[in-house]
Image (cartoon, rainbow, N blue to C red):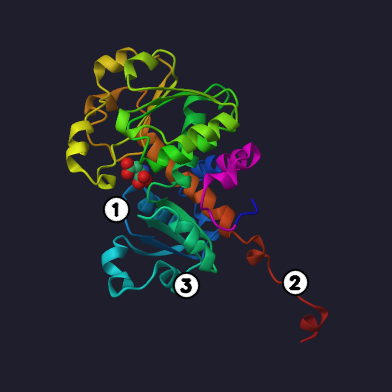
Amino acid sequence: MNIKHVISVEQFLDKTILADLFDTASFLEQKDSHNSLKRILSGKLLASLFYEPSTRTRFSFEAAMQKLGGSTISTENATQFSSVTKGESIQDTIRIISQYADVIVLRHYEEGSALKAAEVSSVPIINAGDGIGEHPTQAFLDLFTIQKELGSLKDIRIALVGDLLYGRTIHSLIKLLSIYPQTQISFVAPEQLKIPEKYKKFLEQKNISFEETNNLETVLENINVLYVTRIQKERFADIELYNSIKNSFEINLPILDKLSDNAVIMHPLPRVKEIAPEIDLDRRAAYFRQARNGLYIRMALLQKLLYEPTRFVPQQKTPEMEME
Ligand code: NCD
């Protein structure tokens, strides 16, 4: 993988690269907690710089780094606890942190911020969510989860449900799905949160078939992945509008009955009310396994970006050294 920064899934629209990433993730999963993993990134430092809240993304990146023997420095509330409060620009902040750390995981509320950061960073930038733009590492773990749960990526029939306008996990996942030609997508959203035109154009160019509806029930029978998302409250200027559509979809037991036995239910989490807690007990509920897969995908990605095998080759003695 000859990639420095991870900004968009568009850098990864290649089945071989993804298969290699998933193989590495599976290998690391098998070896999880093995002491030998600690040598992979020992001496390397990851900085996580989060301007928006996070549980899974930040903790799993930090856990991934530490499991590979590296260490971490972080601020989970960069808007308040970094020099941004003094007026420092994101680019100056990155210029500085890239002098201390070997990789920076950045989450920021502005679309395009990760790209801006990469322009001035001397170390890899990983986009952990840039506003309503993208969330590439979430899409990797989503696709990895689909592969594990369905056994292959050949016949994905997926319903993407909820906030398709602001949901960045959706935006990244759509692009990744586009390289698997048999994929069928059902977009299920309230009228005000429909998928933006540019993503539909993207799919059209790749000949991927999709439909749009606001009626979840009509798509349930045909799909094998039900991917549910949270309505992104923080992106609404009009709270009244949010309140009027916040409970548009709820996956409950009657919905579950209409879903095929072999289907899986996914959610990037956090959930609010989109999935009732009683669904958790159903074996098709894959969202907690999905979150765990994030750990191994992030371990694999960090290894690909930072591992330098030559660091561990014992130095050959030159004849001069032998004589000393
Ligand atoms: C998502 C995000 O931050 O975009 N969370 C995550 O990283 N798993 C989804 C969300 O916040 O709804």
The reply to whether dot 2 and dot 3 touch (C-beta < 8 Å) is no
Q: Quadrant of residue 179?
A: top right
- Residue position for label 3: 95
Q: Nearer the viewer, residue 40 or 22?
A: 22
Q: Which residues are magenta?
A: 4-23
Q: Which mark is residue 316?
A: 2
Residue 267: x %, y % from top left: 35, 34
- The quarter of the image holding the C terminus is bottom right
Residue 300: x %, y % from top left: 53, 48
Residue 29: x %, y % from top left: 49, 42
Q: Amino acid at mark 2?
A: Gln
Q: Which mark is residue 99?
A: none
- On screen, residue 215 versus residue 241, left or right, reads right
Q: Residue at x 63, y 43 (%)?
A: 17
Q: Secondary structure at mark 3?
A: helix
Q: Can you tell which of label 2 and label 3 is closer to the viewer?
A: 3
- Numbered marks: total: 3
Q: Amino acid at mark 3?
A: Arg
- Residue position for label 1: 53
Q: Secondary structure at mark 1?
A: loop
Q: CA distance from mark 2 to mark 3?
A: 37 Å
Q: Amino acid at mark 1?
A: Pro
